[in-house]
Image: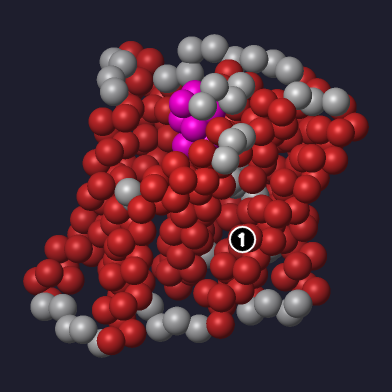
Amino acid sequence: MALFIQVIIPIMLVFLSGFILQRLRPMSVRSVSAVTIYILSPALVFITLYDTDFDSGYLVIIIYMLVLFGIMVMLNKILGKIFKWPDKTESAAILATGFMNSGNYGLPVVLFSVGTVALPYAVFIMVIQGLMNNFFGIYYASRGRDGVKTAFLNVMKMPTTYAAILGVAFQYLKVPISESIHSMLSMVGEASIPVMMVVLGMQLGSMTSLRLNWQVIASSVTLKMVGAPVITYLFVKLFHIDPLVGVVLIIISAMPTAATTTMYAIEFDSEPELVSSMTFIATVVSVISISVVLNLLQL
């Protein structure tokens, strides 16, 4: 109960503020989100990776994020065969289960539950998830060969892609940054977490309709909110992953569906109302499921 009060409730209150704001005074979520995408997040990614001493934990993160996504795709294809889902429904399920909300939701949960020591790993996961989301998300949403080219171009348009490359390069080459610039980037980067939280609330508040296909929703939400953290826990224990890296991986894997998947579903007409429904329901379920995960981890 203490973790629920100290971690989940404060985060939910920030989400709720964005949700209420969007309901009472509708505004362009895309415009507000652009501030995070093009200014705040790149600063956070750059300064975090610049200040980080890389270890084997970062390689583990890359490998596991790809492995977990592959498992989710495989399980959804099996479910698709069993329930005879059409291609668009299968794509919607992959979008809803393959990409977790590691930024808007995952970062604050890791920060508040584990502390700043875990933040570099959480930020790195956000970067990897962003790259995967923008590539594989578009690929599965479009379900066509042209999707590969579009997905690659979309990744190259991401400011965080270049922020990550520069952050790692500057850190590896020991390129000095003046204290004033470092302080400025840190200040801007720190603003990204609360703004991302508000944006998620606004995105949820912008949803106008839900499509309650309970067969797909129940299987996808269960797979995302229960299956993913259980699979991650088994991976961490089986391969004796560093405890700090393991805790961060488990927490992030327990996050609900990434809100950006709805944008891809809308753009490529891949069951957008169904994806929105799964995103909304997974986020609501996460209030309980993440509390359970944090308590089981005994943070």
Task: Between residue 146 and residue 192, name the one nearer to us.
Answer: 146
Vertical position of residue 54 compared to residue 260: above or below: below
| Residue 214 belongs to the span the image colors magenta | no
Instruction: Tell me the residue at 39%/48% (across/down).
Output: 153
Q: Residue at x 36, y 36 (%)?
A: 198
Q: Amino acid at mark 1?
A: Met
Q: Would you name the residue on which mark 1 appears? A: 65
Can residue 24 be seen here? The reply is yes
Give percent across and percent down for residue 46.
Answer: 29, 66
Given the current orientation, which residue lies at the most extreme bottom position? 174
Which x, y percent locates residue 142?
56, 33
Q: Is residue 10 left or right of residue 35?
A: right
Is residue 152 toward the left or the right of residue 227 in the image? Answer: left
Of residues 86 and 146, the one drawn nearer to the viewer in this rendering? 146
Which residue lies most toward the front here? 145
Horizontal side of 224 relative to 249 (left or right) equals: right
Q: Answer yes or no: is residue 247 visible.
A: no
Quadrant position of residue 284: top right
Q: Where does residue 78 sit, x and y in percent of width and height? A: 85, 40
Label 1: element kind: helix
Q: Which residues are magenta?
A: 257-267
Q: Residues within 10 Å of mark 1 (few under 14, many from 20)?
A: many
